[in-house]
Amino acid sequence: MKMEIHLNKNHLLTAPCLKGKRIYLREVVVQDVSKRYLEWMKNPLIKKYIESRDENIKIDTLIQYVKEKQADKNSIFLAIVLNQNDMHIGNIKLGPIDWYHRLADIGIIIGETEFWGQGYATEAVQLLSNYAFNVLNLHKLTAGCYEGNRSSARAFEKANFFLEATRPKHLYHEGKYQGLLLYGRINKKQLKR
């Protein structure tokens, strides 16, 4: 079984450009790290459900993170960009990729809150899932979110992820424990083999 993997001259996974109906996904570059991007990471509504919420994030921290992701041969870090005006509204990550088991995790953030609840996260997850299955030939994708983060849960469910498990009272959040929802999606083409 041949696996088609796009590598650049440094043997790193090359970030694809994936076009959807309303958005496209392209590599996050250092130039994307702007004051607006920093504001996403400082916004209490966004920070509420990310693990770096207590860190004092600065531009330098974000630049370093982008550079690390660009150099990571087991991750793809993409900007979510509107087709109509090229506005960068969020990011999505595939990885780390376990090449032996052909598994990867997906994480997503829509930083521009005016675009919440409009299906952009679902479209981004679907685009990246299709790439992971049809190009990288991965077998399974996983994702997790806080039980209280219904928006993320809905986005994954609409992108054909299924709830595999709930870890009750697993994460300490806002003074109490809440569950962790674990989602998965299996490459159906591989099931037919």
Image: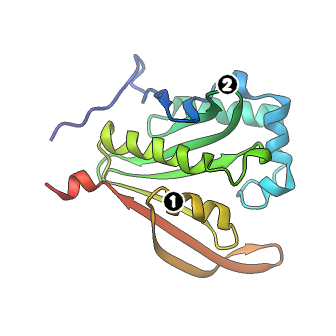
Q: Nearer the viewer, residue 71 or 126?
A: 126
Q: Which quarter of the image is occupied by the C terminus?
A: bottom left
In the rendered structure, find residue 86 and report the number of the disc placed on it.
Answer: 2
Q: Quadrant of the N terminus?
A: top left
Q: Nearer the viewer, residue 54 or 37?
A: 37
Badge 2 amino acid: Asp
Name the residue that disc number 1 marks. Answer: 158
Q: Tag 1, which secondary structure? A: helix
Residue 51's place in the image compared with 163, above or below, is above
Q: Is residue 106 above or below residue 23?
A: below
Q: Residues within 10 Å of mark 2 (few under 14, many from 20)?
A: few
Which residue lies at the image location 43% right of the left edge and 63% below the top edge?
Answer: 184
Q: Residue at x 54, y 45 (%)?
A: 123
Residue 171 in percent (x, y) is at: 67, 74
Residue 14 position by quadrant: top left
Residue in view at x 79 percent, y 31 percent: 60
Extreme top residue here? 9
Three-letter amino acid code at disc 1? Answer: Lys
